[in-house]
Amino acid sequence: MTATTTNPAMGGGRRTPFVMRNPSVLIFLACLAVFTVGVTILSEGFGIGVISTSFIKTLGKTLCLCLIAVAMDVVWGYTGILSLGHFAFFGLGGYAIGMWLMYERTRLIVAESMSNAALPPTPEEISSGIATQIFGVVGASDFPPIWAFAHSLPLQLLAVVLVPGLLALVFGWLAFRSRVTGVYLSILTQAMTLALSLYLFQNDSGLRGNNGLSGLQNLPGVTASQDIVSMWFLWASALALGAGYVLCAWVVSGKFGSVIRGIRDDEARVRFLGYSVEGYKLFVFTFTAIIAGIAGALYYPQAGIINPAEIAPIASIYLAVWVAIGGRGRLYGAVIGAAFVSLVSTYFTGGQAPSINLGFYTINWVDWWLILLGLTFVLVTLFFPKGIGGLFDLLADRRSPDRHGADLGPDQGALREKEADE
């Protein structure tokens, strides 16, 4: 973004870019850049091979989860809308790109298998072969209407943005114009997610029902190994997270940020002051849904598969837990929370954490991880509501005031910095 401000010290004509006026954004981008370069050097595809390809994919997926956590923090931590449906937008983005990946990969396979026929196959025969390969698992052999543009990558990329955005726009308009707030709005978003998930479980939904879309990690026409492809996706995920973080930081700053925080703290007062509360909430809801869709479009090709279970309401509840653990109302807190839970979850559920034998009972962390996550959420909520990100606030509060000898009180001769340190 190009938001700038005039710096009086520079003669009034020099404008400082938004990023330069926000040290926390610069620090985050620097940390993200160091992380990306470090992983690249240690990777199997471009580096010395210390980090395995499977863990590279885990890191890439974690970056995508951090991006949707940032979006969730904007809509919940800054605007006060506890949405329990944002993972639905995440899944829709994954389905949109997954349709093209599965179509194009199947087309190449079908075309190659028919290339040895006595007569060249017609486009209709190829299309029929593709449909049979994709939908044979649900007993169908024709393309549903929603696959009309699956052959076009640009149109499917457009769908990554438009489908979650339009759904959020329509749902938000209906909910906010009715002035549904608080827990009732959370229930509505959860109901929307559940309805969408149950619909996608049906075989006639056009998206292969419970089977979902698979083989998404294989990029059509790309002969590079997974070592290389996994790094491509990690770079794309890091770029998306960096851009999304800057964009969200810009949105929550300035007058707009003050208004949405006012809506979070006292919606009635903001409305009384003449602001269009519904308009602000609708913008934030739609904007963050689009970010969630983009994050999903990058996540599922790295996961390799997407099915309706990914859109179940429990996933959106997990998302809220991540933000709460990291510290809502702080964009970096959302990133910390999502990264922490994602990596710790991988450790406990991936068989890396050793089981604990108590004699009378053996603790298998695969079974106990969700309980541990729930207890962590409860403890953070009760005893450390600012989350992990609140640690930075503690460190900032402990620093001595940087006044350079200036008065520390309203009167001349008030306690000065040097005296305060003695």
Image (cartoon, rainbow, N blue to C red):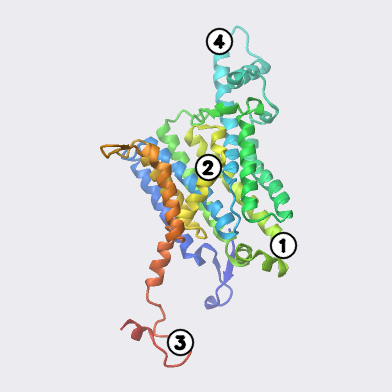
Residue at 73% across, 68% down: 274
Relative to 397, is 172 above or below?
Answer: above
Q: Which mark is residue 295?
A: none
Circle count = 4
Q: Amino acid at mark 2?
A: Ala
Of residues 284 and 178, the one nearer the viewer is 178
Q: Are marks 2 and 1 in contact (CB under 8 Å)?
A: no
Q: Amino acid at mark 3?
A: Gly
Q: Report the disc number at residue 315.
A: 2
Mark 1 or mark 4, which has the lower sequence index? 4
Q: Name the front one of labels 4 and 3.
A: 3
For label 3, the SS is: loop
Residue at image mark 3:
409
Q: Quadrant of the N terminus?
A: bottom right
Q: Is residue 127 above or below residue 295?
A: above
How far apart are the two marked residues, 1 and 4, measured between alpha carbons? 64 Å
* Residue at the outermost left position: 359
- In front of the other: label 2 or label 1? 2
- Toward the front, the furthest residue is 360
Q: Earlier in the sequence, mark 3 or mark 2?
A: 2
Q: Which quadrant is the C terminus positioned in?
A: bottom left
Question: Which of the 4 quarters of the picture holds residue 351?
Answer: top left
Report how far apart the C-alphas of labels 2 and 1 lie in the structure.
31 Å
Q: Which residue is mark 1?
A: 276
- Does 290 appear above or below 149? below
| Element under disc 4 | loop
Residue 169 or 268: which is nearer the viewer? 268
